[in-house]
């Protein structure tokens, strides 16, 4: 039987264990959450600001109310898990250590051209596999287009620095100020290395014959954004026209607003609902005063001498043909002139192949076996997380080439949507997203416009996760068909099958753990092993302090409590997971007092968990009395 994964994880190009780090943020364990997020995504810190969130678009919680704010929780994991120390230039803080895998052969030398997300992801993978990797970067800092063009109000340099420092700390060597075709050739790299990866991205902006070469207040997107990031923004006129409907065009328009343009008009071929930019990016731009002029194609630049006065556009009747191919059609004799003194063209990007025609082979036409292409250089325009995914793929291809062993293929099945029966049974909870600065305030500077969640808000948002595929598993050899699981489940999920063995539907289970805790035969466990985790933490806490507090994290939803801190706290996703054995184990390990902090009566997320926990505490108190011990050693804490 194929493994199953939650749809959020399957949708992530990097196949990140979303449910894993979301669960850890819900417990306030941000450092561990960061480690999980970064395990398959070296740019998890940066993606916490700029990811296009395919995981959220596939979150099963959306059928109940709204999807989990997964991107925000990734960001919170890095921020509160102290992903980087106070000095962003410092080396890794040691929280993450890439496990090296011995390939059983001699380490090979690999050269990578380009220190963007794809190049550095491939580099980290190959170093982890035991190879020696050198990355050649033209710019003085790594990060590729994330560094050079994404505005600081979306992605702060400190987050990107953190990701790159963590990659470098795994053993990846980065040489800066090294440009292909100037400081080295492709032939030299091939001669000195066993494999070469080209990951130089798409550094060129495309234009149209309608527009002259850059100058006279006509710019293209990439040079414009690079100049702004470098601190040398061009002097814009009061009215700016941006041509294009993608995310880069939105960045250009919002940047123009921040540079002081009094009016910014974005002109694009597509209708509003077909624009390639993400909906939230478009909405943010509109809130900042960017005017959307859809279904228009540039026809003629209006100018007087060297002065731009506007852009005449023709109405568009369609952008793609019946086969889905780009084939714009225009409405005859229907034109509109958009006024403006500055035009910035953002209609696409291109790669630089000028230095790839070597003495041995023209790599643009014939790709040698030892040369690989990665990231947007290979795939065309995409996302940062898409570049990370492609970096993994290319690293696996290089490793297969070097070792002669085919790359492993893992194709798990995806968990189906939440069944209709379950949707009304799961309590609705308010979605939390990071605070957004008012538009009138944020357009005045390039400071981060979304400050993000607080620690408590992040934990509360993590608690909304339905823990898909982390639920109960029945051991048929131990099941005694006693019906206990059937009686205690707040969602009526367990059934007794034809062979008198309990059956728990993976697609429905909410991982509260009540059945596992109450099962007298010990036949039920949770996939993520919460019981073992709580036991370990209880022992550790008792060894360090004389008091243990099993704390129901769902209290955060009803109280103004701060996130619980201290070595005595043992957080639980559901207090129903705290068994009598755990309470006694804490005492046995040396605790003088054990508190069981319940969620409020009206706020118990898992139905009978609160009442059953109270009964469990009473049972332990009775046991202590029989043993001649003080029953007050264990107590309920409201």
Image (cartoon, rainbow, N blue to C red):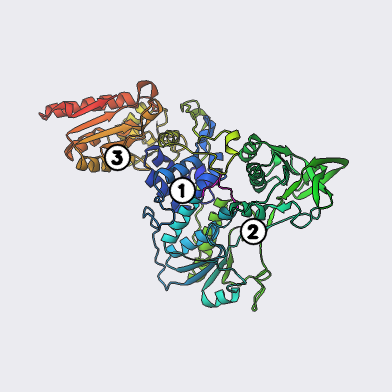
Residue in front for this viewpoint, 519 or 40: 40
* Comes first in the chain, label 2 or label 1: 1
Quick check: 603 above or below 206? above
Q: Which residue is mark 3?
A: 534
For the record, the magenta segment spans 149-156
Q: Quadrant of residue 148?
A: bottom right
* Comes first in the chain, label 2 or label 3: 2
Q: Which residue is mark 2?
A: 202
Q: Nearer the viewer, mark 2 or mark 3?
A: 2
Q: Would you say 538 lies left or right of 493 here?
A: left
Residue in front for this viewpoint, 36 or 503: 36
Q: Residue at x 60, y 73 (%)?
A: 186
Q: Dots 2 and 3: beta carbons under 8 Å?
A: no
Mark 2 and mark 1: span between their CA atoms?
A: 37 Å
Q: Quadrant of residue 588?
A: top left
Q: Would you say 353 lies left or right of 82 here?
A: right
Mark 3 and mark 1: span between their CA atoms?
A: 26 Å
Q: Position of residue 540 (x, y in %)?
A: 24, 43
Q: Residue at x 59, y 68 (%)?
A: 179
Q: Residues within 10 Å of mark 2 (few under 14, many from 20)?
A: many
Q: Position of residue 347 (x, y in %)?
A: 72, 51
Q: Main secondary structure of the magenta part?
A: loop
* Comes first in the chain, label 3 or label 1: 1
Q: Residues within 10 Å of mark 3 (few under 14, many from 20)?
A: some
Q: Dots 3 and 1: beta carbons under 8 Å?
A: no
150 within the magenta span:
yes
Q: Which residue is mark 1?
A: 3
Q: Position of residue 156 (x, y in %)?
A: 52, 48
SS at mark 1? loop
């Amino acid at each position: 039987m194929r493994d199953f994964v939650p749809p959020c994880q399957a949708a992530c190009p990097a196949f990140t264990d979303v449910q894993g780090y979301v669960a850890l943020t819900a417990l306030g364990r941000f450092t561990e959450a960061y480690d999980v997020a970064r395990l398959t995504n070296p740019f998890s810190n940066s993606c916490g600001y700029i990811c296009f969130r395919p995981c959220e678009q596939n979150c099963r919680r959306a059928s109940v109310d709204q999807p989990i704010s997964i991107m925000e929780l990734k960001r919170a994991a890095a921020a509160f898990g102290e992903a980087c120390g106070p000095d962003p230039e410092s080396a890794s803080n040691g929280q993450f250590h890439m496990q090296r895998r011995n390939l059983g052969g001699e380490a090979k030398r690999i050269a990578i051209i380009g220190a963007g997300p794809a190049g550095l992801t491939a580099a980290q993978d190959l170093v982890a596999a035991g190879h020696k990797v050198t990355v050649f970067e033209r710019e003085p800092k790594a990060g590729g287009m994330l560094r050079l063009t994404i505005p600081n109000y979306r992605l702060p340099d400190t987050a990107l620095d953190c990701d790159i420092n963590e990659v470098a700390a795994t053993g990846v060597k980065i040489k800066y100020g090294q440009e292909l075709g100037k400081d080295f050739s492709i032939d030299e790299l091939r001669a000195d290395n066993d494999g070469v990866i080209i990951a130089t991205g798409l550094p060129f902006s495309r234009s149209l014959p309608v527009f002259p070469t850059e100058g006279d207040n006509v710019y293209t997107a990439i040079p414009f954004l690079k100049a702004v990031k470098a601190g040398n923004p061009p002097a814009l006129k009061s009215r700016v026209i941006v041509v294009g409907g993608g995310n880069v065009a939105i960045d250009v328009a919002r940047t123009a607003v921040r540079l002081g343009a009094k009016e910014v008009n974005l002109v694009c071929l597509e209708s509003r609902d077909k624009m390639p930019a993400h909906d939230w990016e478009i909405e943010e731009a509109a809130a900042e005063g960017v005017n959307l002029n859809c279904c228009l194609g540039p026809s003629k630049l209006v100018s007087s001498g060297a002065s731009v006065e506007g852009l005449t556009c023709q109405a568009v009747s369609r952008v793609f043909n019946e086969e889905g191919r780009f084939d714009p059609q225009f409405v005859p004799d229907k034109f509109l002139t958009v006024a403006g003194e500055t035009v910035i063209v953002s209609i696409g990007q291109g790669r630089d192949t000028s230095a790839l025609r070597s003495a041995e082979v023209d790599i643009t036409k014939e790709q040698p076996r030892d040369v690989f292409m990665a990231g947007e250089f290979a795939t065309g325009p995409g996302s940062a997380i898409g570049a990370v995914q492609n970096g993994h793929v290319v690293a696996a291809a290089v490793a297969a080439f070097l070792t002669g062993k085919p790359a492993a293929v893992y194709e798990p099945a995806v968990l189906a949507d939440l069944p209709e029966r379950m949707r009304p049974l799961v309590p609705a909870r308010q979605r939390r997203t990071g605070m957004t600065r008012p538009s009138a305030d944020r357009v005045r500077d390039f400071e981060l416009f979304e400050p993000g969640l607080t620690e408590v808000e992040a934990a509360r948002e993590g608690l909304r996760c339905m823990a898909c595929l982390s639920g109960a598993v029945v051991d048929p050899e131990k099941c005694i068909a006693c019906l206990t699981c059937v009686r205690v489940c707040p969602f009526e999920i367990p059934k007794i099958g034809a062979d008198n063995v309990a059956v728990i539907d993976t697609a429905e289970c909410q991982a509260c753990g009540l059945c596992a805790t109450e099962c007298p035969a010990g036949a039920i466990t949770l996939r993520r092993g919460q019981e073992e985790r709580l036991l370990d933490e209880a022992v550790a806490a008792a060894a360090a302090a004389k008091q243990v507090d099993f704390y129901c994290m769902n209290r955060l939803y009803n109280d103004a409590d701060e996130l619980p801190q201290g070595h005595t706290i043992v957080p639980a996703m559901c207090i129903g997971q705290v068994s009598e054995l755990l309470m006694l184990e804490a005492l046995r390990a040396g605790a003088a007092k054990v508190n069981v902090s319940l969620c409020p009566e009206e706020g118990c997320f898992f139905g009978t968990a609160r009442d059953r926990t109270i009964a469990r505490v009473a049972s332990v108190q009775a046991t202590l009395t029989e043993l001649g011990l003080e029953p007050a050693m264990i107590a309920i804490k409201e």
